[in-house]
Amino acid sequence: MRFLVVDDSRIMRNILKNTLIRLKFKSDDFLEASNGEEAYGILMKEKIDILLLDWNMPTLNGLELVKRLRAMPSYKDLPILMVTSEAAKYNVIEAVKAGVTDYLVKPVTEKNLEDKLNRIFQRKKA
């Protein structure tokens, strides 16, 4: 299982990675990027199984990256978990319309991240 963790905050990337490690994923399962443009470059070179993506970032924000990826046939089924502080209902609706698989509002807890990942994995099996 290969994760790409995208957030402009190094602290938040570390929180997500450490939480995933506590959920029994291996530390070498993670790649990281500090903005959408950097993430896009990684996605074009590496096989990624799940994208954990912040909304608010410089260069290319998370929502713009989702739209770019969903326009490409090879990324139409990539699981994308938007992990963001954007908690308003209209933000969630906008992200879902753009193509995110699920949505998680910060702060992230081990339990809510595990629940979201389990839902994503269940959908992927179906």
Image (cartoon, rainbow, N blue to C red):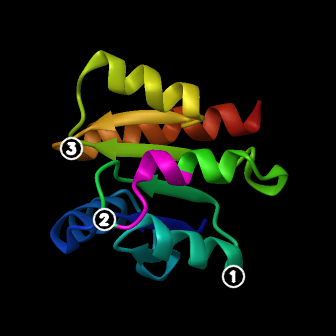
Type of amino acid under label 2? Pro
Q: Which residue is mark 3?
A: 109
- Which residue occupies 53% across, 54% down? 65
Type of amino acid under label 3? Thr
Q: Check if mark 3's residue and mark 1's residue have beta carbons within 8 Å.
A: no
- Which residue occupies 33% across, 36% down? 104
Type of amino acid under label 1? Lys
Which residue is most to the front?
A: 59
Q: Is residue 26 magenta?
A: no
Q: Which residue is mark 2?
A: 58
Q: Position of residue 90 (x, y in %)?
A: 34, 18
Q: CA distance from mark 2 to mark 3?
A: 25 Å
Q: CA distance from mark 2 to mark 1?
A: 21 Å
| 28 and 3: which is toward the camera | 3
Q: Which residues are magenta?
A: 59-65
- Mark positioned earlier in the residue sequence (2 or 3): 2
- Return the mark for residue 63: none
Q: Which residue is mark 1?
A: 45
Could you say whether the residue bearing mark 1 is in a helix, strand or loop?
Answer: helix
Query: Does residue 14 lie above or below 106 as drawn?
Result: below
